[in-house]
Amino acid sequence: MSGADEWLTPSEVAAMTRLTVQTLSNHRWQGRGPAFTKLTPGRGGRVRYRRSDVERWLAGEPTAA
């Protein structure tokens, strides 16, 4: 798997973006943050982000949800 397609945890994305994990959670709820995938269903489901989507979001480019 290339680095651009690497799956990241919310903690890893928080470190990259200098946001808190809670802020990322709020962005997901509001539909504002980088694209993400839920690996397990439900409120407490595991969330992952593609590195390429996070980098596009940081650059101000749209990402597919």
Image (cartoon, rainbow, N blue to C red):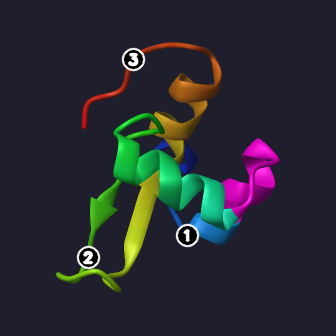
x, y percent for residue 47: 39, 70
Q: Are marks 2 and 1 in contact (CB under 8 Å)?
A: no
The image quarter in which residue 8 lies: bottom right
Occupied quadrant, residue 64: top left
Distance of label 1 from label 3 (alpha carbons)? 20 Å
Q: Is residue 40 above or below residue 37?
A: below
Residue interval drawn in magenta: 12-20
Q: Give the x, y percent position of residue 65.
A: 25, 38
> Which residue appears at 65% of the width and 65% of the height?
21
Residue 10 or residue 29, whichever sits in front: 29
Task: Give the crowd class for mark 3: few <14, some 14-19, many >=20 residues within 10 Å.
Answer: few
Above or below, 61 relative to 3: above
Q: Are marks 1 and 3 in contact (CB under 8 Å)?
A: no
Q: Is residue 5 left or right of residue 38?
A: right
Q: Amino acid at mark 2?
A: Leu
Q: Which mark is residue 39?
A: 2
Residue occupying the point 52% across, 24% down: 56
Per the image, label 1 sits on a secondary structure element best described as loop
Magenta part, dominant SS: helix
Image disc number at residue 9: 1
Q: Position of residue 57 (x, y in %)?
A: 53, 27
Asked whether the viewer can see residue 6, the reply is no
